[in-house]
Image (cartoon, grey):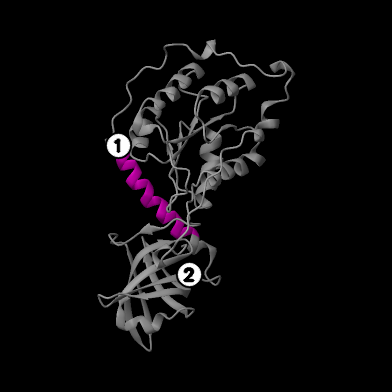
Amino acid sequence: MESRENPLFGRKVFFVNPSFLIENYVFNFLRKNEYEVYMLQDYKKAKSILAAYPDSICFIDIDAELSYSEWYNYMKSFASNKALSGIYFGIVSQNATWEDKDRFMMNVRLPCGFTIAQKKEKLLQKFTSILDINGAKGRRKYLRYDTRDERDVSGYMTFQDKLYTVNLKDISSVGFAITYKADLASLFQKNTLIRNLSISVGRKTMVCSCIVFNTQVNPDNTAMSVLMLTNENPESTKDYIRDYIFQKFDEKMNAQIKTVGSDTASYSQPDEYSQLKVVRDRDYSELEPLEALEDEDKAPASDGNIGRSLDDDII
């Protein structure tokens, strides 16, 4: 059984077989709002990828590639695989009826519900609510990327006409964690405003204004500081850093997708789906359009975590 606690670093979010609406409307919105979201265009690769991230969130669009009966068999097959039994599944559809929705909801484990993607103005709010309830961001508000092994990331600053090199431990769209020699710690006292930190990220060099959030001196004669970008920095700086982070995430995920095997199983038999009976208080033909009442289905809440260290600071 999956843990309902929010993990420290959140959960990866996958959209399998995404529709045009998800790909061009929802996906970029979620990334801009700091959710670690990926698209898996080939559903046959999904099981292999999800097995590597057993606490991830996965939305499957059921309107293409397979029939609803085949998608039903496909999703039922996850329950019999121990490595996949903890995935937080949800379904997305633009064409499903009330009866289709009930068949899936009453017979498949769907912690992230069944979303009808018809009303754009409600769709973004619906997805963010589902992701937040299920701990997609964990304890962090912003995605961080470990840059210690990246050759295209560096930093330096000047003080009293001297140039000092700093190493970027990790970056986010709102700040950085840097390491340096401990004898420079006096330059990074808490709440110090630094206006001339120059960082190179990818092909771009930016001079940033930062405030020191915290500093920690280590026994090995090194120190680490958490720096937060001030409002003096243009929004384009934050956007560029976020885009860089997702570029790196995508490179690693795409490389992984290329190496994993494809699912060769057939999901056409048995046709259990068409035999499922769903009983409601009223006849389906009397119900309002499905999207009008879709907010009735709520995902279960999850618990938070306590405890922190300097390395846990939210950047």
As drawn, the residue found furthest toward the bottom would be: 160
As drawn, the residue found furthest toward the left would be: 220
**Which of these two is toward me, 262 or 51?**
51
* Callout in the foreground (1, 2): 2
Q: Mark 2 or mark 1, which is nearer the start of the sequence?
A: 2
Q: Secondary structure at mark 1?
A: helix
Amino acid type at image mark 1 = Lys
Q: Secondary structure at mark 2?
A: strand
Residue 60, horizontal then vertical, whole percent: 48, 31
Residue 218, horizontal then vertical, whole percent: 30, 74
Q: Is residue 284 above or below residue 21?
A: above
**Which of these two is toward me, 2 or 198?**
2
Q: Which residue is mark 1?
A: 258
| Residue drawn 42% across the image and 53% down it | 9
Residue 257 located within the stretch drawn in magenta: yes
Residue 262, horizontal then vertical, whole percent: 31, 27
The magenta stretch is 239-258
Residue 230 located within the stretch drawn in magenta: no
Q: Assign the magenta stretch its main secondary structure.
A: helix
Where the N terminus falls, by quadrant? top left
Q: Which residue is mark 2?
A: 228
Q: Residues within 10 Å of mark 2 (few under 14, many from 20)?
A: many
Residue 287, horizontal then vertical, whole percent: 72, 22
| Residue drawn 60% across the image and 43% down it | 124
User: Which of the 4 image quarters holds residue 199?
Assistant: bottom left
Q: Is residue 146 above or below residue 224?
A: above
**Which of these two is toward me, 277 or 290?**
277
Amino acid type at image mark 2 = Met
Q: Is residue 218 above or below residue 20?
A: below
Q: Is residue 179 above or below residue 256?
A: below
**Residue 143, numbered label:** none
Q: Please report contact status of discs 1 and 2: CB closer than 8 Å, yes or no.
A: no
